[in-house]
Every structure is written in structure tokens, then in C-alpha cells.
Image (cartoon, grey):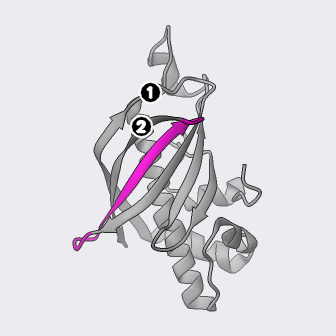
Amino acid sequence: MSKYAIPSRVFLEMGGWRQPLVMVDRIDDYKYGDNGYIKIIKHVTYNEPYMAGHFPEDPIMPGVLISEIFGQASEYLSFLTDICDIWQEKYQQEMRTLRDIHSNIYDENMRSIIRTRRSQVRGVLASQNLKFKEIAWPGDTIEVVSKLSFADSNGFKHYAVSAHVGKKLISQGVIINFRETK
């Protein structure tokens, strides 16, 4: 676990999701820039509402929800990048890592940027060539990495995503995100 975790209250302000669709438990790492990425954690538990029906005798994490984790991780990557860009523009101070963001997270100016940006951005996601190779069971911890591959001329961002349980690759593919500001 990163010692630079974003506090849960702020974490919820950053994301556009609420229960029961919060699929990211924690952001473990973030790097800004051309080789930027985000690493997030999702703990799979028996208490998740979908586990009761998927499948009652042998519950597993539904693939469609792993896709949702990919989408949320990719949006957090875009959102944190937005925050870093806005902070740089306003305060001429670079933020390039989760540690940099964490060092400013209690600053009221940062919180204002987060709330304002969250109210401005909305988007849609699509998945492409997602492959499911293994199963995630209750008790597993899924680690997802999302990296921006490229942004096309129409404003769509393409992310290479992968999910691991321990060292075992359980899923990978591409998430496409289109975001617009209000």
C-alpha cells in the first residue's frame, strides 16, 4: 500500500461514482506525462451485492465489472492528469507523482480544483479487445494498471489496461474514453 494514499473523502470527490458502483478501493501509484500510468487496487469480497447472484454456489468477479474497474482506473488517470495541469497553470508548480499530489491534497486550493473539475467533466467509455484469462474470487485483490496509449484526433483517449491477482494476469485490453467539459 502506498504511503501517499489519497484520503477517502477526497477520493470520493474525485470520482464520479457512488455505491454500489465504486470499483476502485485505492490508488496505489500515479505518474504524469508521456509514459504516465495509474495503478489501482480493488478488493473482491463476498459482501459485494453482485456476488450473491454470480454465481450463488461458486461466486466469481463478473468480467463486466472488471471492465468497469478498467474504465474507472482510466478516468482517474485522466482526472489526476487534469488536476496536475490545472495546478501547474495556476501555481507554476509541477506535480508528477502520487507523492506530489498527496503533498498538496489538504490544501484548500487543491480541493477547490478537484471539486470544480469534477463538476465540469463527464464522459463515456468503451472497451476494445478485452481478454479474460483467469478468474478473480472473493478474497482476491485485483491490481489494475492503466496507461495512456494515445489520443486520437476526435478526442478519444485509448488506454492499455491490465489486471493482475498477485503475479497472475487475469485480464487485459484497451479502454477508450471520451470526455467533454460542461
* One can see residue 176 in this view: yes
Disc on res. 101: none
Residue position for label 2: 171
Left or right side of 31 for 106 = right
**Up-down relation of residue 177 to residue 86 (above or below):** above
| Residue 46 position within the rendered picture, expressed as x and y whole percent measured from the top left | 60, 22
Which residue extends farthest left?
154
Left or right side of 28 for 61 = left
Residue closer to the observer: 32 or 117: 32
Among numbered discs 1 and 2, the one appearing first in the sequence: 1
Which stretch appears magenta? 152-167
Amino acid under disc 1: Glu
Q: Kindly identify the residue that appears in the image at 59 percent across and 82 percent down.
A: 87
Q: Kindly identify the residue that appears in the image at 56 percent across and 28 percent down.
A: 48
| Residue 66 position within the rendered picture, expressed as x and y whole percent measured from the top left | 44, 37
Residue closer to the observer: 114 or 27: 27
Amino acid under disc 2: Ser
Disc on res. 134: 1
Left or right side of 53 for 29 = right
Mark 2: give few (<14), some (14-19) or many (20+) Cα within 10 Å: many
Q: Kindly identify the residue that appears in the image at 66 percent across and 76 percent down.
A: 110
Contact (Cβ within 8 Å) of mark 1 with mark 2: yes
Which residue extends farthest top?
57
| Residue 138 position within the rendered picture, expressed as x and y whole percent measured from the top left | 59, 23
Dominant secondary-structure state across the stretch colored magenta: strand
Q: CA distance from mark 1 to mark 2?
A: 7 Å
Q: Kindly identify the residue that appears in the image at 25 percent across and 69 percent down.
A: 152
